[in-house]
Amino acid sequence: MIDMPRPRLAVCGAAIGLVLAACTAPPPPPAAEPSRPNIVFVLVDDMDQDLVRFMPEVLRMQREGVTFSNSTVTGSLCCPSRTSLLSGKYPHNTGVFTNEPPDGGFAVFHRRDERDTLGTQLQQAGYRTGFMGKYLNGYRPGRTLGGERPFVPPGWDEWAVAGNGYDEYDYQLNVNGRVRSHGHRPGDYLTDVLAKRGNDIIRSSAAQGTPFFLEVAPFAPHGPFTPAPRHAEEFPGLTAPRTPSFDEPDRSDKPAWLRALPPLPAAKAQAADVKFRKRAQSLQAVDEMLSGFRRTLAETGQAQRTHVLFTSDNGFHLGEHALPEGKQTAFDTDVRVPLIATGPGVPAGRTIADPVQNIDFRPTFAELAGAPGRPDIDGTGFASLLRGGPGTGRNVALIEHHEPRVSQEDPDRQEKPDRIPPTYTAIRTPEGTYVEYVTGEREFYDARTDPFQLTNTYPSLPPERRDELHRILTGLAACRGEAQCTEAATAR
């Protein structure tokens, strides 16, 4: 249980002659209005559902708040997913499908949508805004982009962002327009640096009495899966889960790109065990960060007026369907991500099955902040769900993927092109996952009878059901704006 601050002295004793004696208790720090809650948003990188069980603070958040069991990303790749989160728009409306130009990366977002994001919207609503950690692929801390100082995007009062922070050491941070270099000392471990800065922002915001929004985006557990030294020996003997889909032996019903893969070599299976263990280890510092944030919120009197949300930009596979490691597929391992939330009015220990997507964070945060709605963005707020109320009315999630070019500069590159799916569009419905590839191939996995997505049942679907799935997918993949996209995401 979070330690709450002790009550302060409310009434000072009256002296003779009704003269009030001086109060000795310190004055309470200014606080945000309860109707305008603070928001702390922690976004990790490449975390799959199986890793939640190794994070005690996240498990505690589940007991004290709500867990969304159907949180889906709009694209299982870092830059498109993060762009959708910041903008509230699907990839087909942002133009960001990959990590690099011409159809992705920071450069495309900077040119098109960066001046209108959840940061600018909350800042305009009177919030103090902060962003720390990983931003978008292609952002470089020292680039000025035509200005006099290293570039800080609009919308952020506090900015501490790295470029290549995947190793957790030997990186640069752009701190409010000044570049600071970090080396390989224990105190340079990036997740810990972000934790300290985040706690400082929480404390200073509480002292100012201004409602605040803070997004902290650690690079963990993205490869090379570097744990903090204090966690490097955790979980001895831990192995990657051997689910029915691990090294799936019969892929004859799968599309050609997956059907052609050989069985998972023994060395790759062993490597999956090592990597899974390191991923769990690297998340321990993130879990400590979350615990520290929540403790600081309690110490500053902000715990009861702050929403804390935890999620990932995409999932990750390690051996499923004979895929050694990576993401970018439409399988649940890659597109279904953890989402846990706590805060004022949030019921404890509840699991919510209503589908939500990363395009929904912006309107949700805006609604919590009392900011005006924006019908031009694609997402729909789920603030009502946070309070135990009704859902959004949607029951379909859209995933959009462009096959990226092979680039040595891309931290998400996978070993061989044949392990990356060709361009596809997919939807997740209550019944299952439907995929249309640019090759003309199709997949459907029944979520009710095949949770590990082993059997492609598309060939056996009735023609009318095939037509219905195609209609829903094409309508959603062309929608623009909240009203149109909400209607298209509602399967009848």
Image (tube, rainbow, N blue to C red):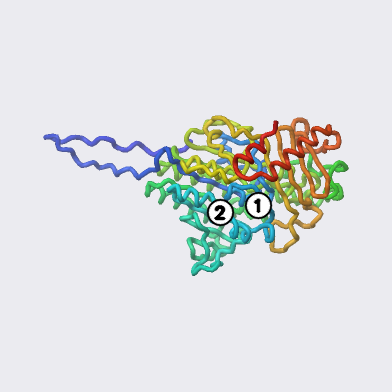
* Count of labels in the image: 2
Name the residue rendered at 58%, 52% in the picture.
218
| Residue for badge 1 | 80
Visible residue check, residue 249: no
- Quick one: 462 or 183, which is closer to the camera? 462
Name the residue rendered at 43%, 48% in the picture.
126
- Residue 416 falls in image quadrant: bottom right
Q: Is residue 229 left or right of residue 492?
A: left
Q: Secondary structure at mark 2?
A: helix
Q: Residue furthest right?
A: 252
Residue 453 position (above or below residue 108): above
| Residue for badge 2 | 191
Quadrant housing the C terminus: top right
Residue 96 x %, y %: 66, 54
Please, what is the three-letter code of the amino acid marked with disc 1?
Answer: Pro
- Quick one: 129 or 294, which is closer to the camera? 129
Visible residue check, residue 355: yes
Name the residue rendered at 63%, 45% in the picture.
480
- Among numbered discs 1 and 2, the one appearing first in the sequence: 1
Residue 72 position (above or below residue 326): above
Q: Residues within 10 Å of mark 2 (few under 14, many from 20)?
A: many
- Quick one: 296 or 84, which is closer to the camera? 84
Q: Secondary structure at mark 1?
A: helix
Residue 6 x %, y %: 36, 37
Residue 82 x %, y %: 61, 51
Determine the CA span between mark 1 and mark 2.
Answer: 23 Å
Residue 394 x %, y %: 64, 35
